[in-house]
Amino acid sequence: MQQAAIKFEPYLQSKQEDLQARILAAKQKLGKRVVILGHHYQHESVYRHADYTGDSLKLSRYAAETDAEFIVFLGVHFMAEVADILSRPEQIAILPDLSAGCSMADMANLAKVERSRRELSKVLDFDATITPVTYINSAADLKAFCGEHGGIVCTSTNAPKILEWAFQQREKVLFFPDQNLGRWSGYKMGIPLEQMPVWDPDLPMGGLSEEQIKQAKILLWKGHCAVHQMFREQNITRFREQYPEGKVISHPECPFEVCLHSDFVGSTEYILKTVNEAEPGTQWLVGTELNLVNRLAEQMQAQNKLVQFMSHVVCECSTMARIDPQHLAWTLENLADGHVVNQIKVPATEAQLAKLTLDRMLAVS
Ligand code: 13P
Ligand code: SF4
C-alpha cells in the first residue's frame, strides 16, 4: 500500500542548518528528475538551491526548455502556472507554498476584465479596436482571455516590443493589471500621458467619459505592486545630493516619477546585469525588492561598488518570502519519497489559450 505524503508541521520545528542539509540530500536523491527555478526576489536561504535563476521572462524560457520531470518554482503562483502551461503535459510544476501569490496579479480577475470588455463594447467594437495585453503577473484565465481576443502577454523585459506588436494589430490597448509598467512602456514609445487614462474596473465605464475612451491609446488598468509603490522621487533626490556621480536604477513597476528620474529602468535581470557590469567604485541606488538589493549589495562589495536600497521602509515582497527552507525541504523530501505535493495544474482549455499568448510573446521577444 502506498504511504501517505509526509506532513508539513514537523518542519516548522527543524533547525535551519538541518533544513539546508536535508534540501541538499533530497535534491541529490532526485538528481535530474527535478529542476529548481528561482526568481531573484527569493531569500538567499532558498535562492542558493536554484539550478537556474532569472526574471519572469528568463524563467519562463527555462520552464519551456527543461526535460526535468518536476519543475519546483521558487517564486509566486503565476510563475508556477506559466511553468505548467509551457512545459509538456507529463511534466509537473510545483509551488512549495500555495499561498505564495502576487498581490498585483490579484488586482485583476476574469469577471472584472469581462465586464470591462462589455462596457467598452458600448463605445467601440472591442475585438476590432483593442488588443488586450496582460502583464505576466496575472492569473492563467486572464492570459486565456488575451488568447481568445487576439491579445498577448508581456514581461517587464519585453513590454515595449510587445506594445509595438499590439499596435500593429489594432489601434488601442487595454493593459492590465499594472498601470505603472503600462504607462512607462507607453511613454517610452512616445504616447502622451493624456492618451493613457486609468481604467478603474470598479467604476461604471472605468470612470471615463466616452470621449476619453475614444481618445485613448492605452487604457491602463487600475492596479499596481504594493512593494514598488513605496519608492519615491524624494529618495532619488536625497541620493543624488549625497552621491552626485551616483546612478539610479529602477524596476518599471515603480511609480512614473521614479522611473522618470532614474538613469536606467528595467527588469530584475537587467538591474543585476547593469550593476554587475558597471565600473568598480561606482554608487548605485536601486528601486526594487529588498532581497535582490541586499544580495547585490553584498556581492558588489568586492568591487568596491556601493549599492543602496531606494527606501528607508522595508519593501520586501511578503508573498515571495513564503517560499522558505521549511517548505522547500518538505516539497523535495516528498518528491524523493514518491509523493507529489502542491502541484500547479491549469485546466486544459484555459492552458491551451494561455499557451497561445505566451508562445506569441516568446516569438515576439
Ligand atoms: P521581473 O520579471 O522583472 O523579474 O519582475 C517580476 C516581478 O514580479 C517584479 O515585481
Ligand atoms: Fe507581485 Fe509586487 Fe511581489 Fe512582484 S514584488 S511578485 S509584482 S507583489
Image: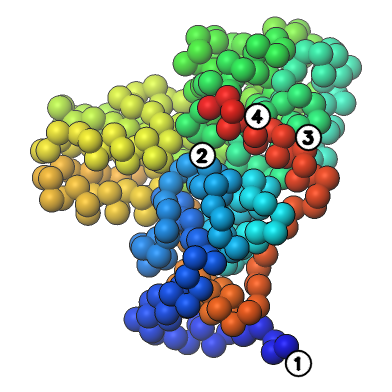
Q: Alpha-carbon distance for marks 4 and 2?
A: 13 Å
The outermost residue toward the bottom is 1
Left or right, 318 with reference to 207: left
Amino acid at pointer 3:
Phe
Marks 3 and 1: which is nearer the front?
1
Quick check: can you spot residue 231?
A: no
Q: Alpha-carbon distance for marks 3 and 1?
A: 43 Å
How crowded pointer 2 is (Cα within 10 Å; few <14, some 14-19, many 20+) is rated as: many
Amino acid at pointer 2:
Leu
Q: Alpha-carbon distance for marks 4 and 1?
A: 45 Å
Residue that numbered label 2 is attached to: 57
**Residue 126 to residue 253: above or below:** above
Q: For disc 3, does the CB lie below 8 Å from ligand 2?
A: no
Foreground of the two, 187 or 98: 98
Foreground of the two, 54 or 246: 54
Q: Which mark is residue 1?
A: 1
